[in-house]
Image (tube, rainbow, N blue to C red):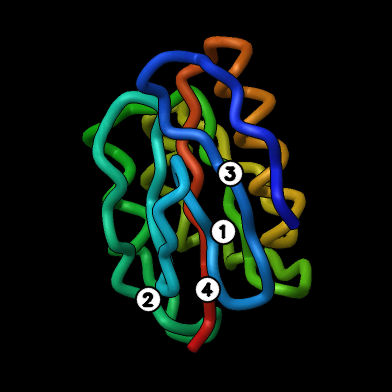
């Protein structure tokens, strides 16, 4: 799906996505990524839902977003609470949704000026 790019300055915006990719500011990514509005996009070293570990979510502690939008892949799947416990301990919320809904929700929250992060799982 192509999304229209808003001229919201230098903010990282999801501009398109499909079953095996996401575009951030028109740059295509075919692996899992972490996205925040004002920081560089980071490769997220996880290739499947079953390979998720607490260390993957811990990568989001230092940037300290208000909320993490977890795009769990093509299907809605919830991570075990032990995987996100470190985020909860820091009062960082985690919302889980399928990949496409996560892309759309990230854009909405980012456009509202929220301190949001998207953890987008692209399974290989």
* SS type, badge 4: loop
CA gap between label 4 and label 3 equals: 16 Å
- Residue position for label 3: 15
**Of marks 1 and 2, which one's residue comes earlier in the chain?**
2
**Of marks 4 and 3, which one's residue comes earlier in the chain?**
3
Q: Residue at x 72, y 70 (%)?
A: 77
Q: Quadrant of the N terminus?
A: bottom right
Determine contact: label 1, label 2, CB under 8 Å. no
CA gap between label 2 and label 4 equals: 8 Å
Task: List x then y, in percent, for residue 86.
Answer: 37, 46
Q: Is residue 2 left or right of residue 35?
A: right
Mark 3 neighbour class, 10 Å CA radius: few under 14, some 14 to 19, many 20 or more: many
- Residue position for label 4: 122
**Of marks 2 and 4, which one's residue comes earlier in the chain?**
2
**Of marks 3 and 2, which one's residue comes earlier in the chain?**
3
**Of marks 1 and 4, which one's residue comes earlier in the chain?**
1
Q: Is residue 58 left or right of residue 14?
A: left
- Residue position for label 2: 46
Nearer to the camera, 23 or 31: 23
Residue 55: quadrant of the picture:
bottom left
Task: List x then y, in percent, for residue 45.
Answer: 29, 72
Nearer the observer: mark 2 or 4; the answer is 4
């Amino acid at each position: 799906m192509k999304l229209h790019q808003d001229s919201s300055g230098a903010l990282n915006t999801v501009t398109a996505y499909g079953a095996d990719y996401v575009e951030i500011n028109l740059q295509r990514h075919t692996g899992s990524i972490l996205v925040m509005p004002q920081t560089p996009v980071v490769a997220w070293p996880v290739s499947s839902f079953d390979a998720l570990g607490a260390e993957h979510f811990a990568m989001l502690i230092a940037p300290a977003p208000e909320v993490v939008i977890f795009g769990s892949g093509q299907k809605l799947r919830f991570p075990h609470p032990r995987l996100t416990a470190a985020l909860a301990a820091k009062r960082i919320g985690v919302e889980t949704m399928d990949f496409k809904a996560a892309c759309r929700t990230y854009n909405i929250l980012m456009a509202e000026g929220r301190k949001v992060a998207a953890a987008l799982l692209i399974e290989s």
